[in-house]
Image (tube, rainbow, N blue to C red):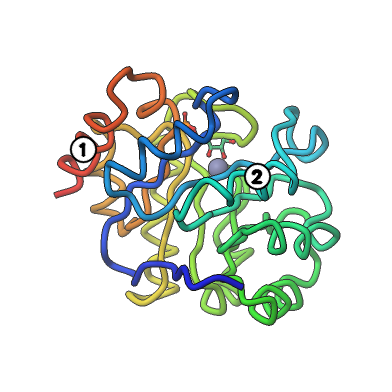
Amino acid sequence: MSDLRLPKAGIIEVVPSILSADFAQLADELAVIESAGVSMVHLDIMDGHFVPNITIGPPVVAKLRQHSKLFFDCHLMISEPDKYIEHFVEAGANHITFHIEVVDEPQKLIDKLHKLGCTAGICVNPDTPVQRIEKIAPLCDMVLVMTVHPGFGAQKFMSEVAKKVIKVRKIVGPDIRVEVDGGINPQNTPTVVSYGADTLVAGNAIFAKTDRIAAINAIRDAAK
Ligand code: DX5
Ligand code: ZN
């Protein structure tokens, strides 16, 4: 268990997703974003089953943990989250988001995460209605609304889908974080913030730029 805490809801956090970073230089990439003053990093975990792509597992998370004091926001795009949660927490995950599409008893998973000392998140895919998480969302620490179909970075932001954030914010109130993920950039940031998102995941908009710090600041400025 670590001392890192999920920042209080309502304060805008830009959360770089390392999916678009240089995977051969991850420790350096983390150091750069840490120097930009971010407090969280988004780790996309894909299993080649729930999504058609494969990324990293607990051993890589554990190695990254040795190089970073950032809050690890782990987004599990995997078919059997229950099977792997302990491993990710042990590896150093501070927050774990699982997808409602693959879980029958979400409350059990949320309780398990809390018992493990990890904050809990639930995620809805673009095609999944917000009603699916209506009851469970208030039990989470953060709710994630996908604004692209999960699996790959650098996809186009789905503006109609982003409106789901308004419903989610209404359900959870002001004290739970609402995160958006997929195609976030300085241009659409004012929109998602006006809908009620306070946690802005960005991969391509940061790591496709040579100056990652300037790219983070551009999103921060757009959120003001
Ligand atoms: C997509 C991932 C995202 C992705 C976002 O499946 O969940 O976290 O890295 O990347 P961008 O910002 O490039 O859409
Ligand atoms: Zn993600």
Q: Nearer the viewer, mark 1 or mark 2?
A: 2
- Please name the residue shown 69% across and 59% down the image: 100
What is the x, y in percent for residue 183? 42, 31
- Please name the residue shown 33% across and 49% down the image: 38
Q: Quadrant of the N terminus?
A: bottom right
Q: Distance from label 1 to label 2 (Cα)?
A: 27 Å
**Residue 83 position (above or below residue 186):** below
| Mark 1 crowd level (few <14, some 14–19, many ≥20, 10 Å Cα) | some
The residue that mark 1 highlights is: 217
The answer to whether residue 9 is left or right of residue 148 is: left
The residue that mark 2 highlights is: 63
The answer to whether residue 172 is left or right of residue 198 is: right
Q: State the residue in front, 107 or 32.
A: 32
What is the x, y in percent for residue 59? 75, 45
- Please name the residue shown 48% across and 23% down the image: 154
Q: Residue furthest front?
A: 66
Q: Quadrant of residue 43?
A: top right
